[in-house]
Amino acid sequence: MRPFSYQRATDPDMAVQALGAAAAANIPLPQALAQPLAGGTTLIDLMKLDVMRPAAIVDINPLARGWSEIEPRSDGVRLGALAKMADVAAHEEIQRNYPVIANSLKLAASAQLRNMATLGGNVMQRTRCSYFRDVSYENCNKRNPGSGCAALDGVNRMHAVLGVSDHCIATYPGDFAQALIALDAMVEITGKSGVRSLPFAQLHKAPGSTPDIETALQPGELISAFSISGRWPRSVYLKARDRQSYEFALSSAAVALDLQDGTIRDARVALGGVATVPWRAREAEALLKGQKFDDGLAQRVAAVAFAGAKGRRHNSFKIALGKRVVAHALQQAVTMEV
């Protein structure tokens, strides 16, 4: 690990000012000279691997006094970005009205990590692409822009089949983000100009020709909270992985349904483990709305969700697997007691 300076930010303005040092250099956020430290469960790993080389670390844990609240409201819920994953997963309101959030957090990482990791850090975690995390590979457009992508014709079993480009097929690795996508959440961002809100679906950027630019955050900006409108007690997160504990998704689905008298009035479907960003399957949602559910509909919706998928040598199995995960998640959501 390379030497770095350490600063403890005691208020949001101090954190923004310290992190804003990267803005002058116009450096993409992941390569910024200064990085925020919350749980540190991804950042420290990547610094040890020499993937991230910040000159300065800004510890934002003192901001938890105002940024870690779980706030049920009359019209939804607001989650502070520094709330711990384990605390949110165990919260009674979350388990009752947003089980898709509780399930996505419980199925993410180990218990030790969930006790340390924060919501904001979780959605900002970097890809697990081995070519990105191993600096002995020079060809990684995400880590070394313009160098190529070793994964395209390499070992790409874990890589994406949706949202890919000729420049990058790295998979977004998280679970919680899919729940936020399915709940149409908003993200609050604190920067030098104050607080702005953004649909969470617009936070992550598909790779296109610039896979090194991963989010809409500007240097110096921090995620301060997430907000969700309404209540979604009929919501499910289903995750297929190589083992039952502590493993990233091969394919996952977050589903939220509004069901009345057997008819689907509203539907949200998000996919994980298969795309370069948290992926919302809007065409699949449209197929569900106004319909009576049966297994045939589930199969058709799953097929539509993966209609644009592009598999490569080792990861084409994800297309068939992903369809089954979507269909099973829909079946679970329809039959759950609320």
Image (cartoon, rainbow, N blue to C red):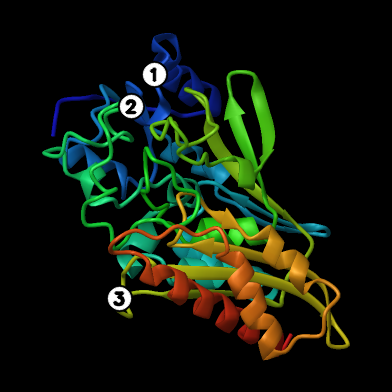
**Measured Cα–Cα span from mark 2 to mark 1:** 6 Å
Query: x, y (%) of residue 292?
Result: 82, 85
Q: What kind of element bears circle 2?
A: helix
Question: Does residue 105 appear in the picture of this structure?
Answer: yes
Measured along the vertical axis of the image, is residue 325 above or below residue 129?
below
Q: Amino acid at mark 1?
A: Ile
The residue singled out by tag 2 in the image is 31
> How far apart are labels 3 and 1 at the CA level?
36 Å
Q: Residue at x 34, y 56 (%)?
A: 159
Residue visible at 55% across and 49% down in the picture? 68
Residue 270 percent coordinates (x, y):
59, 62
Q: Nearer the viewer, residue 283 or 263?
A: 283
Do the numbered discs 2 and 1 sit on residues whose CB atoms are within 8 Å?
yes
Q: Which residue is mark 3?
A: 242
Judged left or right of residue 154, residue 158 is: right
Residue in view at x 50 percent, y 23 percent: 16
Quick check: 22 above or below 331? Answer: above
Which residue carries the number 1 mark? 27
